[in-house]
Image (cartoon, helix red, strand yellow):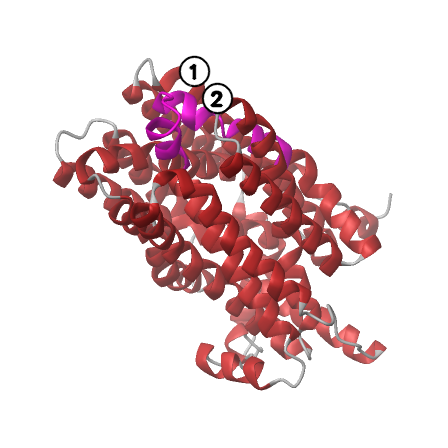
Amino acid sequence: MSETEEKEKFDLKHTFLIGLMFFPTILAWEMYDSQVSISLYFYLGSLALVGLILGLDNLLGLIIQPIMGNKSDNTRSRLGRRMPYLIIGVPIAAIFFALIAFETSFFMLFLFIFCFMIAMCFYRTQQVALIPDFIKTEHRGKANAILNLMGGVGAIFAALISLLIVDVSLQLAFIIVSVIMIITLIIGFLTVKEQDAYAYQLCLEMDTEEGAESKEDIVRPGLIESLKDIASEKDKSTLLVLLAIFSVYIGYEGFRALFTIYGTEVLGMTRGAAGGMLLYASIVFLLVAFPSGILAEKFGRRLIIKIGLVIFIIAMLLAFLIQGTAILFIVLILIGIGYALVNINTLVTLWSLAPSEKKIGTYTGVYYFFMYTAAILGPGIVGTIVEVIGFTYFFLVCALFLILALVFMLLVTREEVQLTEEEKIARKKFIEKLEK
């Protein structure tokens, strides 16, 4: 095999090792969402307040993560530009995560939660950015799929720990997650040598070249300007897709944040059993995530997203009409399918709708703005409505936001722009420049 062919090979080793470090991040967040909601509800007794606090991590992420991502882009050290932040952030996050289970008052609980959130936001962007640092453009689709699969494994582990350990000892369950976070960081530190990453080496070369074009040379319109451009487009497909994304995440984040409370308060389950029920959705998401991308390529992303929303809605309505633990098995399987079909294809749809290569970065930023804003507001909105009309309407409230998302998607008339071959080449080059 020639040297060129060797370089073009998919770097499975580093993809897996980076995914291994990503796995406990999702494990911790899933445990946080399913179990901390119960602790907060014990002190506050208000679904609206619980939802408000659970949405706080997304607000902090919206503020902190872009800053830390930019900071790491400009970091140069013998450990690389991402790893120093992981070495600091992961242990601090692990310590405060474990402490959450040892709270003795609402003040201590909120303090530990807030410190955990800050620590997670400190390194999350850098952790994901290791993929494009090591993996070249033509293989990033596969690498991202593996990263999502490892995240799915984290969600499965969270459900299993909830199911098997939480009711025995909440403290032990949280300590296990923290230990896993530290162990995977050590493995990553010893095996992922960021100095060897091709993107980092390229950055070092560019630093030494006088007048080299840098990432800052790329003109990126501000958020408000970008939203105005999208709103002024004659075809409203992009705006409608964004509104659909916003509605989906209002319903989905509300579901995730309050599901464990629903299981304990309405169905009489233990907190461990209620959190463990999410295992079924996580396993199904893991199985459907990769095929959903293949189906979208074959039949069109709009169609697959709409099918996913229909399945999602059917699941929520089933849970509302037939309330009980038995039906939840079917409901959560359907939720896993529906969420995979929607989640995997929405960002790619927005990329395809970008009118020029210079808009791809902008569209990505706008996507995350709508997603994070919905994730911030979702638990609070769903919690407030449910508190007013009754917890038995929990799944119906979530379904209404998914129905609204489906209406927006039905109004979308296209899923991509027509580009010349020159524009396609320019778009590819711009994506490569963005991801360096």
How far is the residue under mark 1 from the one under mark 2?
A: 6 Å
The x and y percentages for residue 253 are 44, 48
Identify which amino acid the numbered label 2 is placed on.
Leu
Q: Position of residue 225 (x, y in %)?
A: 48, 84
Asked whether 9 or 209 is in front, the reply is 9
SS label for mark 2: helix
**Screen quadrant of the N terminus:** top right
Q: Can residue 372 be seen in this view?
A: yes
In the image, is residue 163 above or below residue 46? above
In the image, residue 68 lies in the stretch drawn in magenta: no
The residue shown at (40%, 35%) is 28
Badge 1: residue crowd in 10 Å (few <14, some 14–19, many ≥20):
some
**For residue 344, side relative to residue 41 (left or right):** right
Is residue 381 shown above or below 206? above
Residue 265 placement: quadrant: top left
> For the point 66% across and 72% down, which residue is it?
430
| Range covered by the magenta-colored residues | 259-285
Report the residue marked by disc 1: 164
Q: Residues within 10 Å of mark 2 (few under 14, many from 20)?
A: some
- Which residue is disc 2 drawn over? 160
Percent across and percent down for residue 126 are 46, 52
Residue at (74, 71) in percent of width and height: 414
For residue 138, side relative to residue 253 (left or right): right
SS label for mark 1:
helix
Residue 82 in sight here: no
Q: Main secondary structure of the magenta part?
A: helix
The residue at 44%/31% (across/down) is 186
Task: Answer whether residue 277 is magenta in the image.
Answer: yes
Q: Do the residues labelled 1 and 2 touch (CB within 8 Å)?
A: yes
Kind of residue indicated by mark 1: Leu
Image side of residue 376 versus residue 232, left or right: left
